[in-house]
Image (spheres, coloured by chain):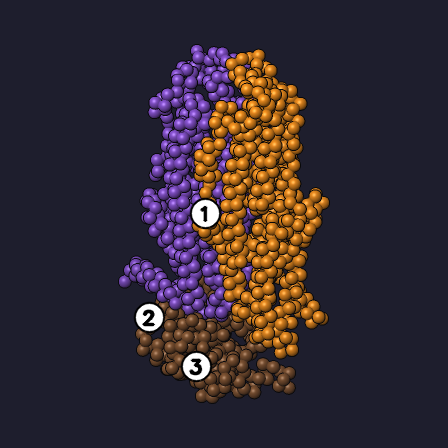
Chain colours: A brown, B purple, C orange
Amino acid sequence: MNPSVTSLAHMPKLQAEQLRVLRSGKEVLSGVSFNVAGGEVYGLLGGNGAGKSTTLAAFLGFVPAASGRVVVDGLDVGSDLAAARRAMAYLPEAASLYEHLDARENLDYFLQLADMRCSADEIDLALDRVSLGAEARGLKLRSYSKGMRQKVAIALAILRDTGILLLDEPTSGLDPTAIDEFHGLVRGLADAGKAILMVTHDVYGACQVADRIGLLRGGQLVAQFEAPPGGRIDTETVHRAFSPRAAA
Amino acid sequence: MGRRTVEAMSARSASASVWSALRREAAFLARDRSAWAWWLVVLFLSVLAVSAGLNEVHRQKATIAHLVEADRAERMAVLKTRKEWSAVYHSFHLTYDPPSEFAFAALGRRDDAAWKHRVRMLALEGQIHERDAGHPVLALVGRFDFAFFAAFVLPLVLIVLLHGLRAGERVAGRHDLLVATAAGDSGRLWRLRAGLRATVVFSAAVLPLVVAAGLSGTAAPTLLAACALLFAYVLFWTLVCAVLAAWQQTAEVILAALVALWILLGVVVPAAGRIAIDRTVPMPSGADIVMTQREAVNAGWDLPKANTMAAFVERHPQWAAYTAVERPFEWKWYFAFQQVGDQKAQALSEAYTDGRMERDRLAGWLALIAPPVLLERALQVLARTDVRASLAYEARVRDFHASLREFYYPKLFRDDRLEPAALEGLPEFSPRAAGR
Amino acid sequence: MIRLRVIAGAEWRYWLRSRLVLGSALLMAGLLLATTAVTTLRMQGEAAERTHHQDKAEAAFLAQPARHPHRMVHYGHYVFRTPTPLAGFDPGLDPVTGQSIFLEGHRQNTPMFAPSGASADLGGFSWLSPAMVYQLFGPLLVILLGHGLIAREREAGTLATLLAQGAPGRLLLAGKAAALLSVIVLMSLPLALSAALAVRDGDPPLAAVALVGVYLLYLSIWGALALLASALLRRRTAVLAALATLWVVLTLVLPAVAVSATSNAAPMAGKLETDLVMLSDLRKLGDGYNVNDPAFARLRAELLAEHGVQRVEDLPVNLRGLVAQASEQKLTDTLNTYARAQMAAETRQAIVLASHGWFTPLLAVADASRALAGTDLAHHHRFLQEAEALRFAFVQGLNRVHAEKLSFSDDIRRSSDAQAEARTRVDASHWRLLDRFVFEPDAAGSRLARSQSQWLMLCAWFAVLVGAGAWVGGRLKP
């Protein structure tokens, strides 16, 4: 597959091109290339230290590319960081918001931070979409469970209304029901045209929701899998590629 | 649609977004209870500091008022019981340095340097170094005045409030989300947060000062200068805190570094500087001045009287015709050798004063690299409680003593009898008019 | 016991691997070394200079030629207070009190020339001494080392592991406390060294040991505070911020506030004010220069009767000298009454200030430290009293010479008759009546006794904190 041949209509929203990243002199990503188009969920799989989070950090502009480049919505992150960040919503791993504020106050604050104003109805609608109980919305976040916090953070990503979503280990620590709910939500957002990059080490979850999966190992993209039209990626295949010894 | 229109629009929206960002952060801060607690603490401490200062100034004024009365009564009593020159010998005259209208904010040297003296027409060098200072333990521990509060406590409050600006968010796991979400330059978020916190700290600190200044009638320019100084000082520490808070380190490392900086600027540099300055500017020991003066005065008894009178006339040629001393004891000879005693010690005494002046000048330069000391000294200058003010008072005491001599010498040398009526024009010490 | 050592050992390993801890410890050590060297040298210099001035003053007095003894009463004498060796660690009141007094007849002068008056003015902290480093910055190092003791384990989740393995909370706290205590002992080594040097130079060993002890207790209080905060608060940053705040309040704010409160609660009239009241008292005593002053009529009548003569000229003693003696006696009684009242007022104020030590251990340790180092208010007062005793002794000695060696008729004519004046001069050998002035600091026993209430305060602080620690230890939760 050759990225330069993609048509304009399918222009990728996220592109990594021969991305190399050094952290304190050590190469943690060496020549990673992939892209994510609108309407697509791309699962980036890998074990600990494979370079998943670094790839996300490179898209967010937290680490500079030593060579190669990362492009967000046609904007080079290296040169146009602020605009690139405006185009993305980010869901960090331990979705931490302000403990001394309630769900609405948190959303209100972060939206304003993104230079957006949303009405109370819009906020409530988003909280409905992530199915956060109405009775919890007025409570301070310190009384929330991990799943509830996650829901508020997703509501924020929804309200940001960006074409691109970056998710960092979004399902870790959630119970199975919450994971299913979450996957449904992600699928829905992708179907509405968003480009979603999801970093995870959960093979099963990734296969359930992703259109394509990239496998990172030792800072290199070692394999890519694509779902057949209308179907899902085969978990068994990915699992074998992910941990050959366990599968054997 | 030209490119320019787009730029103009974005400029307008930028200024609007600064304003809305400010509102956003203000609303956010208003919900932070620990920040509120800190501002209440600052407000409380500031009120405490200025009220303690006002109290002390009030006490000093009352002391002066009382002393003025008691001094007059005492002199009257002396003039009643003693006669002629013996009365002059026994008459003390009160001098004092009233606190300025801004002294409440920085009591400065008034704790351990004399601001009141009673002098008489004997050799001055034996009298002017007497100390009627306050309680030594209290002077050692130091008072809680506004200058101390602002110079030393306030930076620590800023340090505690601002050191975790980013590290705190990092530990809480919000840092990346905040940076990724913030529209435009994410550095602005931290600048706004630091600025807002510091602004509120500044206003909590300055408010009691302004009220107290109003109560005590401080001149507007003095108060404005003090506020400007305080603002610059808070700005300095806010910048320092913000710069270090941006450091990719844990909150404890940043806090330790900031406190170490506070110790360096507030304690180590001043301590080393003081030792260096005291070494650089040698001064005659005080003991040498008073001993020289005493030797000179006492030698006066034994030296041929003509020698004493000759030395006296060098400075007071107008009395050359009246210097004949016939009896073994005459008052004009006695007062003349007191004067000669001062003359002998003059070089040392001037060196002592110049030394203090020079040390203070160097201390002023050194304070430029020790901001806490710079602020404290600057406030003391505004309050006229600095070394210079204390030296100026000493100079006024000397002037007054000289005017006493000028008043008595004609009567002494022309052998006037000292009728009570002759004391009509007796000079009275006038402290510098308040308000400079 | 073994488990205790394991827990403490683990803490030490963490500290030794933490660059923050090592760096701060190095800074502290550097600060201590520098201040100890500088302060010791300065105080030794001061001691040498003051001893030199004292010798010079005594030599000058003895070298005076033959003259009228009353002239020597006014020639006067200087005494200097030489600092104790321990003053090299804690100069105490030395910089703010005058170090020399001019002694003369009829007057009690104030000490002159406090070093603080002549030095460059760079704020209160510029008088940094080793004692101040311990009082102010010792707690900071203890906080830095101690804030993470429990909170770090809690944040890393290892606290749960430790508790789950059956280590009781109290044992855990005790082990952590032992680790911190060993650091505190290590921190007081420089102090122990200064104290040992002071003992070599003549300070009592008991006072030196007590000085080390009182700082150990003080730093242990801060250690207990750090440990408690670490056990009670969840986050390390919160522990650190809370302890830093506590430090600001206890070491910077409260002592200064206590000073302001004290000058309100126990106001003290200045010397000028009391002098003015005293002067009106003194006027009632009569003029010691005037033998005809009615105040001395009785003395005169008694003398004339005792010797069976009619005229004072016929007395075998010089009435003027006797009147001078009697008048100096009465005068000194009054002066001493006022001086005692002034000292009592100062002591009262100092006690009020010291009582704030219940609220901040800094005041308690500072008071105890000055008392033990021999640089406190009581020592200053004793210096004043001994100076006064010396003054009275030589003035009265000279007055006795005046009464016994001079003839009354010469004495009254000396202002107008040069020959009579010459006969009133007495030989310089009489000046040897001046005693040598050596200011001896208090013995260890009385220094300790004076720091008694400070020990009580510090022990109370410590006991309460240890009690709280035991309580918290029993309820330690991950």
For disc 2, the chain is: A
Counting from the top left corner in percent of width and height, residue B34 is at 44, 65
Q: Nearer the viewer, residue A99 or A118?
A: A99
Counting residues from the N terminus, which is met first, the one under dot 2 or under dot 3? 2
Where disc 1 sits, the SS reads loop
Q: Is residue B404 above or below residue B435?
A: above
Q: Is residue B382 above or below residue B420?
A: below
Counting from the top left corner in percent of width and height, residue B157 is at 46, 57
Q: Is residue B362 above or below residue B213?
A: above
| Mark 1 and mark 3 residues within 8 Å of each other at the beta carbon | no
What residue is rendered at 57% in x and 68% in y? C468
Dividing the picture into quadrants, the one containing residue A122 is bottom left
For disc 1, the chain is: C
Q: Nearer the viewer, residue B180 or C401?
A: C401
For disc 3, the chain is: A
Three-letter residue code for mark 3: Val
- Report the number of numbered marks: 3
Q: Which residue is mark 2?
A: A117
Q: Which residue is mark 3?
A: A186
Three-letter residue code for mark 1: Pro
What residue is rendered at 54% in x and 69% in y? C232
The answer to whether dots 1 and 3 both sit on one chain is no
Q: Is residue A199 visible?
A: yes
Circle 2 or circle 1, nearest the eye = 1
Where disc 2 sits, the SS reads loop
Q: Which residue is mark 1?
A: C267
